[in-house]
Image: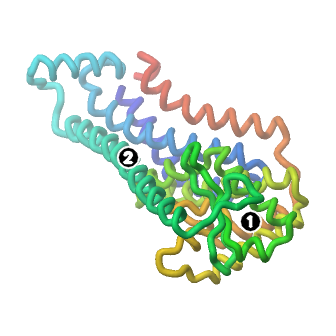
């Protein structure tokens, strides 16, 4: 099992630094945001599994030839309240570190969810006071604010799109329709769940490059995915004008005390979530102004297969009995 622990540690190091750095610099991701999103998720999941798995396997190495056997023997020692001369200081240290890291990740995930849920509830309460339903657009609220602001507020059956009257005055009907389609794509594709998980990943391990890079990349990719939905009904030039107007208006907006306006630029704009950066905005506009062909089916399949392989490798190393000694 010692070799398994070393292989998992090597994979964890690769997924913590060189792999996410290389992917963050890749230019193909804007051609297939969906495939890139799947790959980022695989990197995060495989990285976390490899980190915890490497410490767990190393700690249990004296107890068996594979993880399942070692876990059974460890449970027997714990249940029987027996001492084990086979486990030395570094084995116990590795086991404690694996347990603490696993609990830390789960706790941070729950804490981030609770924080976002609380902010979302307070935001909804403000909207009930400061907004009015849009008579022309279904499940849309309008706030009184001069700056062009648009965002979505997830909430299951209570999910809504929020627009400012400044936005509705500034955009043409075609541009407004593109913005609404964009925001609704965030809701229907459940982008808030992706952002929540990657934000929790960053909060749990802020010193790890992959957590920062993955959060930035995912924040940009969800915007591109929503743009692609809006492009089905609006020309690219219309969408570009809408993006530019809303982004400029949101940058200049100074929300009044207690106002929900300014919760985020055009995009998800959800309270507690990272806002879209200038680099992400430039990437979105660039891919609309100078469209590039999407990845071929073979290329997309290769990316998705690579994503599956990333998850399969640590899983097989951990669970396949006797595969690696």
Which residue is more in the foreground, 165 or 239?
165
Badge nearest the viewer, 1 or 2: 2
Classify residue 176 by image quadrant: bottom right
Image quarter hosting the N terminus: top left
Query: Going by the image, does 222 lie left or right of 110?
Result: right
Q: At 63% across and 43% down in the image, what residue appears?
A: 39
Disc 1, SS = helix
Classify residue 147 by image quadrant: bottom right
Classify residue 53 by image quadrant: top left
Q: At 40% across and 36% down in the image, what residue appears?
A: 6
Q: At 62% across and 70% down in the image, what residue appears?
A: 143
Query: Going by the image, does 309 lie left or right of 208?
Result: right
Q: Taking 130 as reference, is 11 above or below it?
A: above
**Is residue 60 visible in the rendered structure shown here?**
yes
Image quarter hosting the C terminus: top left
| Res. 283 mark | 1
Q: Taking 44 as reference, is 58 above or below it?
A: above
Asked if the residue under mark 2 is in contact with the one under mark 1, i.e. CB atoms within 8 Å, the reply is: no
Q: Position of residue 36 (x, y in %)?
A: 68, 47
Q: Position of residue 119 (x, y in %)?
A: 44, 60
Q: Taking 39 as reference, is 136 above or below it?
A: below
Q: Taking 286 as reference, is 185 above or below it?
A: above
**Is residue 19 visible in the rendered structure shown here?**
no
Q: At 28% across and 21% down in the image, what residue appears?
A: 71
The residue that label 2 is drawn on is 110
């Amino acid at each position: 099992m010692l070799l398994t622990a070393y292989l998992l540690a090597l994979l964890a190091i690769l997924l913590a630094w060189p792999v996410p750095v290389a992917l963050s610099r890749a230019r193909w991701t804007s051609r297939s945001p969906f495939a890139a999103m799947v790959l980022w998720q695989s990197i995060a999941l495989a990285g976390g599994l490899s980190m915890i798995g490497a410490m767990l396997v190393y700690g249990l190495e004296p107890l068996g030839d594979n993880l399942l056997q070692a876990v059974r023997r460890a449970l027997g020692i714990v249940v029987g309240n027996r001492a084990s001369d086979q486990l030395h200081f570094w084995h116990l240290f590795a086991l404690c570190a694996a347990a603490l890291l696993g609990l830390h990740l789960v706790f941070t995930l729950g804490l981030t969810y609770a924080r976002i849920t609380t902010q979302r509830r307070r935001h909804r309460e403000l909207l009930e006071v400061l907004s009015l339903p849009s008579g022309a657009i279904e499940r849309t609220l309008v706030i009184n604010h001069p700056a062009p602001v648009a965002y979505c507020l997830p909430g299951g059956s209570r999910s809504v799109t929020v627009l400012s009257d400044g936005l509705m005055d500034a955009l043409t009907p075609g541009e407004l329709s593109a913005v609404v389609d964009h925001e609704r794509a965030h809701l229907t594709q459940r982008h808030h769940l992706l952002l929540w998980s990657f934000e929790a990943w960053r909060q749990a391990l802020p010193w790890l490059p992959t957590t920062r890079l993955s959060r930035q990349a995912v924040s940009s990719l969800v915007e591109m995915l929503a743009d692609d939905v809006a492009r089905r009904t609006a020309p690219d030039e219309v969408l570009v004008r809408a993006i530019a107007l809303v982004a400029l208006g949101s940058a200049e907006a100074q929300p009044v005390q207690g106002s929900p306006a300014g919760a985020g630029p055009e995009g998800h704009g959800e309270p507690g979530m990272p806002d879209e950066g200038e680099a992400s905005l430039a990437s979105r506009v660039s891919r609309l102004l100078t469209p590039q062909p999407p990845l071929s089916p073979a290329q997309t399949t290769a990316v998705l297969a690579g994503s599956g392989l990333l998850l399969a490798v640590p899983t097989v190393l951990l669970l396949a009995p006797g595969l690696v000694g």
